Image: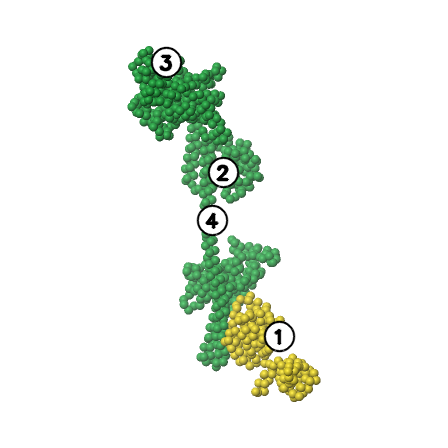
Chain colours: A yellow, B green
Amino acid sequence: MTDSGTSSELRNKQVFTTGEAAEVCQVSQQTIIRCFDAGRLQGFRVPGSRFRRIPREELVRFMKDNNIPLDRLESDKKRILVVDDDEQIVELFVDVLSRDGRFEVKTASTGYDAGMQSQQFRPDLMILDYMLPDVNGNIVCKTVRDNPAMAAMKIIIVSGVVNQDEIDDLLQAGADDFVKKPFNIERLMARINELLEIG
Amino acid sequence: MPTPPDPTSARRIELILEQVEALPTLPAVAMRLLQITSDDESDAREVIDTVRADPSLTAKILSLCKGAAEGGVNVTTLTIDKAVVLLGFEAIRNAVLSIKVFEQFNGDEPTEEDELTRFSRPAFWRHCLATAICCELVAAAHGGQEELNPAEAFVCGLLHGIGKLALEHVLPKSYQRVIELTEQTQGNIADVERRVIGIDHHTAGKRLAEKWNLPHTLCDSMWLYESPARSLPDVPHRRLVGLVGLGEAVVRAQHIGYSGNYLVVDDIDERAEALGLEPAKVRDAAETVMEQLEQRGAALGLGETPSRELFMESIMQANAVLGRLNSRLETHRRQAARQTKAIDAIRNFHANAASSARSVGDVLSTVVASAASVLGDGQYAIIYQPTGQSNWQISRHTHEGRITANHLVEPPPQVGQLSVLARREDLPISLMGVMPWLSDYLVGFDDLRRVKLMPLPCAWGTAAVLVHDRDALPAKDQLKALTYTWGAAIGAATQHEGARRMSEQLAEANRVLTETQDTLLRNQSLARLGEMAAGAAHEMNNPLAVISGRSQLLAMQLPKATKEQQAAAQVYEQSQKLSDMITALHLFAEPPEPRYEQVGMVDVMQDAVSIVRKRNPKLPALRFNPAMGLPLLHTDRQHVAQALAELMLNAYEASPTQTVRVLAQVDPLDDRLVIKVTDDGPGMDAHTLKHAFDPFFSSKPAGRQPGLGLARAQRLIEAIDGRIELASQPGEGTTASIRLPVGKVKDEVGGSASGTAATPEANGEGRVIHADP
């Protein structure tokens, strides 16, 4: 397992062991254990054992309190979640986005899946197909918008609809933009950069 | 008519009949005589014995025989037995019957004071006896015919009018009235009997005959003698009954005695022929009636009056009758002359009415012309209520019928339908109150007090009212004939007009229905197309997105300017076109809901130009001069702009090297804004014109791009209550027009805006755009 691989793993973790926390903070494991036991780093022990565990939010707070750089916890790559039930469309988006190199991409094929991924992956931007097998895109939009933890997430709805009224409805549900299928790659990328404020 | 109209009168007649039937029965000898026949020798013997037992009867019979028998039989030597041998049993029987029947009424002798008007029984008997003799003579002259037995004919003739005696006996006062009235009207006494008493002497005679068990022959003679020969029932004694009627008529024609019937008899010959009798023989009989009457009358104790006096009386009676007849004839002649005029007028009216067109107006004119020809000078007007209108039309006419003034006026207060108001004869009364109101429209009529209102009736009431200001009107019956004719013609024309209008409305309704069906059909197919397009768009867009995306990626990744890279770029380009087409189809099938706003033509035009530029950047610069004085539109700016853009693109494609002109103006006829896009292209033939709005239709040769342009433009404009029309001729270019409602302002829009929109300036025409190549 390479360093970068490890880092990448750690970036997405929600709960950390003392060893992992030590790596993220670039301190010794002993230091982490000391701080944990002293109560300066909040956490819990795994039931039925003495293993210590630290939730991500607590670790972030600890690192900020002690001016430890967050680099190893949070990547500079933007996270994008692609939601579509059409496998080939998903693949196309993944290829297009990966080509750019600045994005970390995950995918979902249902509304439910999209909700789960939003919680765990905390994407910066979601490319959301309107017609999903379980719920429609506007429901997903609303669910995301109702959650304050995901307030910053950008949403681009993708659909074949052409009627301006319907497009307006989608934007009303909380989407930041609408892209019509089929799409022009350059224009799509420009829109994504704009929304994520990256050049 | 004898049919009583109400139960009281029916009951009264029954009472009279009961009284008639309550008359004393005939003496036993007469009754017995009726029951036996000559074949029954023993019974005949009995009768002869009975007669012989009555000396006065014997004397009368013997004296009767003396007159009737041939060869001058010596009365002194004659006995009843001999008489029977000589004359036959039936003759004796009939003689006895006659004598006894008349004796039955002998009690009713006239009193002094009312002798003048009372039923003169001797005169009546003379009439009866003369009839009897006439019948006997005619029957004898046609000797050998079984159903015309002279003796039987005699007794039938004698007793034919016995009903009069019965009625007079039962109702002396009423019958006196009958006599008087008959005298006054110079009619048939039977008609007066029916009017005054309720039944006539025919019926009374029949009842009496039934009561007395008289033979059918007698009964029917009394009942039916005045019926025309052809209407007599088919019974064996049919001719005999007819003969009685004939005999009666012959006697009446000679004014012998009193029959009560003053009607003139002038068809003896025809009547005779109808009965199969020889007119000559009837005439012969008629000549000898008088002579025989004296002999027989004396024998029966009737004719105490000397023959000369009888003759003189007859002549005087006849003269009096003739005098009355003459005066009536004169009256008739005068009536006929007047009626001829009316009939001429009616004939001319029909001739004119048939020749000209049959609108109600034409008929009204013809009616006035006809009226003027009959009624002469004066002013004429007609009040008419056109079908389905509450107003009345009052038209003034010349004598030729030409209309000089025409008012459509509100009916007078409390008066509604002319047809109901003016029911026939009641009209002048019901219109009395109308006169002051009417006078407003009759300026120029000489004297309004003399104005006559003549209702012209038709099947459903009054078709119209003729107004005329002279007194000289024809007699009531002629006027009636005329007004009914005119009224019927107006009524027919009204109905004809109604039927014509109805058929026109039906045709119009059919046309609208067909159009509606077409539109419905189109909308239905468009709705289906919409569903299909929406589904298809979704289904196609994913694969298309993959094709488009992958080809873009390829084009990006492959080395520039290689064949492969170009191919990939082409794939992308074409997929975009396909996508556009799906979008267009989708939008065509489901056009967006219009969003109405106030918008000026110039703004719409600018939008359209920018759409055109975007769609076809190769287009030359577009110039347009904003026109002044065009109204604001209350419409969907996008719809109009896009539709206009489609038309402009279409026009440009039709004539890429020529000028495309766009003009907007308000059509003064229907207050719509018309935007015309005209090109100088090759134009369209009828087939192309018809299908120009069909999606994907193209008249262009294969390879040119067919599309949705015009179809979409039409959808967009129809969605905002507008219309698109195409006018074109091959070789003469094409003009596409968008017609939009002006000033269709919704409630939420302010009044000032609607004012602006609704009042285009007088010079509402302007060149909006001028597109040069």
User: Helix, strand or loop at disc 4?
Assistant: helix
Do discs 4 and 2 belong to a common subunit? yes
Amino acid type, mark 3 = Ala
User: Helix, strand or loop at disc 3?
Assistant: helix
Compute the Cα span from label 1 to label 2: 88 Å
Q: Between disc 4 and disc 3, whose residue precedes?
A: 3
Q: Which residue lies at the image location 43% right of the left edge and 19% below the top edge?
A: B105
Q: Between disc 4 and disc 2, whose residue precedes?
A: 2
Q: Which residue lies at the image location 48% right of the left edge and 81% below the top edge?
A: B559
Amino acid type, mark 4 = Gln
Q: Are marks 4 and 1 in contact (CB under 8 Å)?
A: no
B351 and B516: which one is in front? Answer: B516
> Which subunit holds the residue at mark 1?
A
Do discs 2 and 3 belong to a common subunit? yes
Q: Nearer the viewer, mark 2 or mark 3?
A: 3
Quarter the N terminus of chain B occupies: top left
Kindly identify which residue carries mark 3. Answer: B59
Amino acid type, mark 1 = Met
Q: Is residue B156 visible?
A: no
